Image (spheres, rainbow, N blue to C red):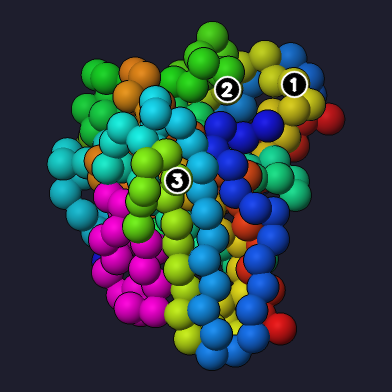
């Protein structure tokens, strides 16, 4: 069982928006700005999309945005494209001796 | 450009050790530490640990802290992860990642370690 909870799947049609949640606790997501989001296409290494809660990494399209409220972080993908079909993972710093925890991942399907 | 190039796939027997290397280039090696993240077949991501550029500081996940050692060779800008007393549940793709304040900015191509 992962430390952060993500829905196992999400879907949307091309052009639509979809939001993926990532629920932690007051010991991780709720306490630190260090929440990141990663995209992983099948058979590939993950790629950083978002860091420090809502900052887009270099080269990431502005269709990807993120926010946080309390113990839950969210990633929104707007204007869905076929290439967005992938697995998405959140991670958070826990403050516990520099530990990082991940969510279980969400498989995004573009219908 | 930042590159992290890892060593090739390994097959080990239970109880053995494995040492995976990660050659870094394209950035100032002494400025940013490296984490290792693993992914079991069909599973999610799991943080394994972190090592400072000098190798003087490390931090390991509780799950493996008694069996893992991470080191660096600053002369060759190479990072190493050794995992001992291998078990079947250590079977995974191991990634080295450039760790910039808990954000994994750049990833190696991954090294499959199979314990069987």
Q: Judge if badges 3 and 2 mark residues of a common chain.
A: no
Q: Residue furthest bottom?
A: A15
B80 above or below A18?
Answer: above
User: For mark 1, does the 10 Å Cα neighbourhood hold few (<14), some (14 to 19), or many (20 or more) residues?
Assistant: some
Which is closer to the viewer, label 3 or label 1? 3
A73 above or below A101?
Answer: below
| Chain at numbered mark 1 | B
Horizontal side of residue B31 vs A39, given as left or right? left
The image quarter containing residue B10 is top right
Instruction: From the top left corner, tell me how far across and down residue B9 is, in percent.
Output: 66, 45
Residue at 52 percent across and 24 percent down: it is B82
Disc 1/disc 2 C-alpha distance (Å): 10 Å
Q: Judge if badges 3 and 1 mark residues of a common chain.
A: no
Horizontal side of residue A29 vs A22, given as left or right? left
User: For mark 3, does the 10 Å Cα neighbourhood hold few (<14), some (14 to 19), or many (20 or more) residues?
Assistant: some
Which of the image's four quarters has the C terminus of chain A?
Answer: bottom right
A87 above or below A70?
Answer: below
Q: Which residue is mark 1?
A: B87
Q: Which residue is mark 2?
A: B83
Q: Which residue is mark 3?
A: A72
Residue at 74 percent across and 14 percent down: it is B15
The residue nearer to you, when weighing A82 against A80, is A80
Disc 3/disc 1 C-alpha distance (Å): 34 Å
Q: Secondary structure at mark 2?
A: strand
Note whether residue B7 is visible.
Answer: no
Kindly identify which numbered label has been placed on residue A88: none
Instruction: From the top left corner, tell me how far across and down residue A97 is, in percent.
Output: 34, 18
The residue nearer to you, when weighing A25 against A84, is A25
Q: Secondary structure at mark 3?
A: strand
Report the magenta residues as a range: A49-66
Disc 3/disc 2 C-alpha distance (Å): 34 Å
Answer whether residue A57 is magenta in the image. Answer: yes
């Amino acid at each position: 069982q992962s430390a952060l909870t993500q829905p196992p799947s999400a879907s949307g049609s091309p052009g639509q928006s979809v939001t993926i949640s990532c629920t932690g606790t007051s010991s991780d997501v709720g306490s630190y700005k260090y929440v990141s989001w990663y995209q992983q296409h099948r058979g590939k290494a993950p790629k950083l999309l978002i860091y420090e809660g809502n900052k887009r990494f270099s080269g990431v399209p502005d269709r990807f945005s993120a926010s946080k409220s309390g113990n839950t972080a969210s990633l929104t993908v707007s204007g869905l494209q076929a290439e967005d079909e992938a697995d998405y993972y959140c991670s958070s710093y826990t403050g516990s001796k520099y530990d990082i925890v991940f969510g279980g991942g969400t498989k995004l399907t573009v219908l | 450009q930042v590159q992290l190039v890892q060593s090739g796939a390994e097959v080990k027997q239970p109880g053995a050790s494995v040492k995976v290397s990660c050659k870094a280039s394209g950035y100032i090696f002494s400025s940013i530490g490296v984490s290792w993240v693993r992914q079991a077949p069909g599973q999610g991501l799991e943080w394994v640990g972190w090592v400072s550029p000098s190798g003087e500081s490390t931090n390991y996940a509780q799950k493996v802290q008694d069996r893992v050692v991470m080191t660096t060779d600053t002369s060759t800008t190479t990072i190493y992860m050794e995992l001992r007393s291998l078990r079947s549940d250590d079977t995974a793709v191991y990634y080295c990642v450039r760790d910039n304040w808990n954000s994994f900015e750049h990833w190696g191509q991954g090294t499959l370690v199979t314990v069987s």
